[in-house]
Amino acid sequence: MENARRRLIWHGVFLFLLGLVTGLVGEHFTNPRMGLSAHLEGVLNGILLVALGSVWQEVHLSSRLGAAAFWLTLFGAYANWCVTTLAAVFGTGSVTPIAAVGRSAQPWQEVLVSVGFLGVALSIMAAAVLILLGLRSE
């Protein structure tokens, strides 16, 4: 993945911008507290992608594992922002009881957000393991 470094940085700045925009409209969500969380997810995951792009040349993996780490990280970062934004829009509360005290949404919305957060967790953890493997001293 020849341009992975530059692409990670580009996506990081773009996700950072999405987070900023989310912060501007966060008070209009069904659950404004989750709107704030979505804002923070966009900003922090954007910073994560920029930081990872900055050190990407130090991640030594096979082309296949490198591609997996790249795509898992991108998916996890965007999905984290997207699922958190959906939770704010829907007003879900089953997997975020602290940010959604007393709130609940339609059952299908709760399931969608729950499955989304599970996908985020699995993809980010898998990416972190691969990146750690790629950063180990040789």
Image (spheres, grey):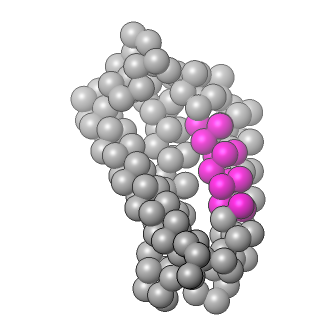
Left or right side of 33 for 18: right
Left or right side of 15 for 108: left
Image quadrant holding the C terminus, namely: bottom right
User: Residue 83: percent from the left, percent from the top?
Assistant: 46, 43
Q: Nearer the viewer, residue 103 or 74?
A: 74
Residue 75 in view, yes or no: no
Q: Above or below — where is 26 with respect to 130? A: above
Q: Residue furthest front?
A: 138
Q: Above or below — where is 10 with respect to 38? A: below
Q: Is the stretch drawn in magenta largely helix, strand or loop?
A: helix
User: Residue 8: percent from the left, percent from the top?
Assistant: 66, 69
Which contiguous range is marked in magenta?
38-51
The residue located at (44%, 75%) in the rendering is 68
Whether 96 is among the magenta residues is: no
User: Residue 90: percent from the left, percent from the top?
Assistant: 43, 29
The residue located at (40%, 19%) in the rendering is 97
The residue located at (29%, 27%) in the rendering is 106
Can you tell which quarter of the image residue 78 is in? bottom right
Image quadrant holding the N terminus, namely: bottom right
Can you tell which quarter of the image residue 26 is in? top right
The residue located at (46%, 56%) in the rendering is 124
Left or right side of 59 for 91: left
What is the tally of numbered marks visible in this picture?
0
Q: Above or below — where is 38 with respect to 50? A: above
User: Residue 58: percent from the left, percent from the top?
Assistant: 66, 77
